[in-house]
Image (cartoon, helix red, strand yellow):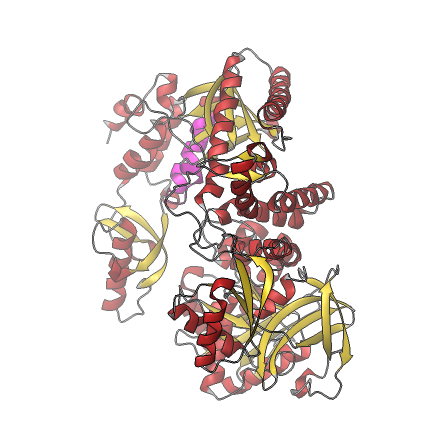
Amino acid sequence: MSGFVLTRQIQETVDGIRLIFWLQTALGPVKLEVEGEQPVFFVETDHAQLAARILKQHNISHSCRELNLTAFNHKKVTGFYFNRLSQFYVARDRLKEQNIKVYEDDIRPDDRFLMERFIYGSLVFTGANATNLPVISHPQCASATFRQVEQGRAKAGQYTPSLSMLSLDVECSFAGELYSIGFYQDSRQVVIMIGEPQANAAEYIVWVEDEKALLHSTIHLINSWDPDTIIGWNVVGFDMRLLQKRCDLHNIPFAIGRDGSILQWRQNRLSPEQHFVMIPGRVTLDGIDLLKTATYNFPSFSLEHVSQTLLGLGKDIDDVDNRGEEITRKFHQDKQALAKYNLMDCKLVWDIFIKTQLLEFAILRSTLTGLELDRIGGSVAAFTNLYLPKLHRAGFIAPNLGDGERDLVSPGGYVMDSIPGLYKNVLVLDFKSLYPSIIRTFKIDPMGMVMGMEQAESAPQAVIPGYDGASFSREQHFLPEIIESLWAERDKAKAQKNAPLSQAIKIIMNSFYGVLGSTGCRFFDPRLSGSITKRSHDLLKTTQRWIDDLGYKVIYGDTDSIFVSIGEGHDDGKAQEIGKELMALINARWQQKLTDDYQIDSALEIEFETHFHTFLMPTVRGTDIGTKKRYAGLVGRKEHEQLVFKGLESVRTDWTELAKCFQQNLYLKVFHNEPVEDYIREMVNGTMDGKFDHMLTYRKRLRRKLDDYQKNVPPHVKAARHADDIHKANNQPLRYQNKGWIEYVMTVAGPQTLEHQQAPIDYQLYIDRQLAAIADGILPFIGKDFSSICDQQMQLF
């Protein structure tokens, strides 16, 4: 039968370890148990006898055998196998204490079982139905249509699951006492509320007597609805953690696993405040984490902000910023309103998942890499899953962290010095997926470098030179082929307009350079990452020279993009024609150059991406030096016209709406050759008259606890301290002590929060630091300046 892996566990038994995989299949959930797997690590054969003696001295049961595998140092290795995971860990520690190097000791048996069979999400399994096993110990699980334990084996397969979701949201007091819990699916919705039944209440409200009854009802509902995934907003860090704490308080087993088992928790070793949950047979997916993994970016990841941005809808509450007090008030005075609010939060999360296809994205990422559905980040793990089994079949075992060259530095992407100015007709040419295409073209690969360095001594023509002494085998490598297959799948996904799959593949491909350049990866070696980034530097510099030789002017370049000024005397059609000609010429030249210089085929592809009708490359404030990663331009015509900002105030979260509005309108006027003086004076007047007070709010995050800010205290921290001083004087809860967002304005008495603004707004400060700063970024390019325009006006104040 085919299935898709939902969760994976390791269970120690008297007979050894048991791997447990919960699968989703066409006939329902299946619990697959695999017996007889052994944890394994590797030791260089030269040290194997000593290692065996040490383990024997410590009475650690094991078996070992010499393998037809070598380490990257070309030394043969011996595999050490264990029946118990506990023996595996103790053995590893005892050998390390004796300075015996152990390889691949950090790979869990369940992960190794899947990756060595090239199982990525979907699989085909066979086995015996173990009907005599007590599969379902929890009576509330009985509603599932099909559930059995299969004892057997598995291999890679192709199966696209259709996973069910349940959106969950908890409402509680500041102290964590539960008020209600909402559940949402398209076909049914429930809010379980503590309180006496009320007349004319909505049908979706289920009334319970107290918190214990609420918890029992929640466990029963989850088990009876039987979802594959539980979704929410900070659902692991808040909702599930709180439910676990309240269950512990009342001595209630939080048993929502598909076999009636309780949740399993673990902490992040590097960030102890971060917790991970494992529910046998169910996956908990957090909307915030998934959006970030899918490279969404918002000024705030609050549910209110994200839902307003993506859906045009927000929370069903009047005072979002003080929702804690409002929720408590509703619970005591208007429980039906709280139930409506609770359910709306569930629905917003559901709608965000549907709108952004987050579940589909998670499934596809798992299918491509073998990562767990709920895995946060995981670029290194994804690379390991894809690369390690291929490496083993080529006769190598993987290096350990720290084995790579450490004394070299790999630079970042190449950023050219810009030529500031206000331009007409600027073309942007982009190298498509530059770093992955460099890996493909120049055969950059961890094993390929090991083999290439060896081959270079006797047959230099058999290798492709890298940087810092690296050489790469022309024939023995895996990463270029992995990228090539992903690339082809992405082209297919784009043709089919499959946005989640296309995005998932793009993220995976682009992560490979970061993995090779990360000290947290076992394959880290600056010669690998440097052979990518240093090659990109040469590519951009050479391409710039070719374009300049054609009589055009390269005014900026950044990592994989080149900005070309072609001059004013071209209409839109001619500019498009030049862009396509440059694209074709550069691609042909690179193909020819790489054939001549290295006898390799080019996978590099530059694309003509954008034509800016008008383009501003500003200067560093107060200088005549061009900026980097900051520009603005106008693309399109008439109703399709679009103003593009990069790195400027309009796209930054630490500038007010006044600044953003002013910048967009001012730039449009300059780009359209319209007069600017009257508009500038109008904005200055309006600011001084208080017409734009609603646009003067700063919104910033407190990234540390309030007491941790000691030196150079920024304005938002001063505003937070001022507000909490007022809260303390009024015996109110302190709001800003432990991180979070704060909104404030600048007053003549300093920064103050909106709810505790006591002094008049300092309008002159906004004019000087916001309006003037923005205006002077563009006005000099048309021979004007803010002070001259405003001098006469400002004398009136």
Magenta-highlighted stretch: main secondary structure?
A: helix
Where residue 512 appears, x then y in whole percent?
Answer: 54, 47
Which image quadrant for residue 78?
A: bottom right
Asked if residue 663 lies in the magenta stretch, the reply is: yes
Q: Residue at x 28, y 52 (%)?
A: 752
Residue 419 within the segment the image draws in magenta: no
Judge whether 142 appears above or below 241 on screen: below
Q: Position of residue 629 (x, y in %)?
A: 42, 33
Name the one closer to the observer, 569 or 493: 493
Q: Measuring from the top left, give residue 621's x and y in whole percent.
A: 31, 29
In-image side of 410 versus 222 (left or right) = left
Q: What span is colored magenta in the figure?
A: 649-668
Q: Give 248 or 87, whichever is nearer the viewer.
A: 87
Residue 165 seen from this side: no
Toward which corner of the image does residue 693 lie, by quadrant? Answer: top left
Residue 63 relative to residue 615: left or right? right
> Which of 576/35 is in front?
35
Q: What residue sits 42% from the left and 27% below the top?
A: 416
Image quarter of the N terminus:
bottom right
User: Measured from the top left, where is residue 486 in percent x and y?
Assistant: 66, 46
Q: Which quadrant of the figure contains the C terminus?
A: top left
371 relative position to 774: left or right = right
Q: Is residue 282 visible?
A: yes
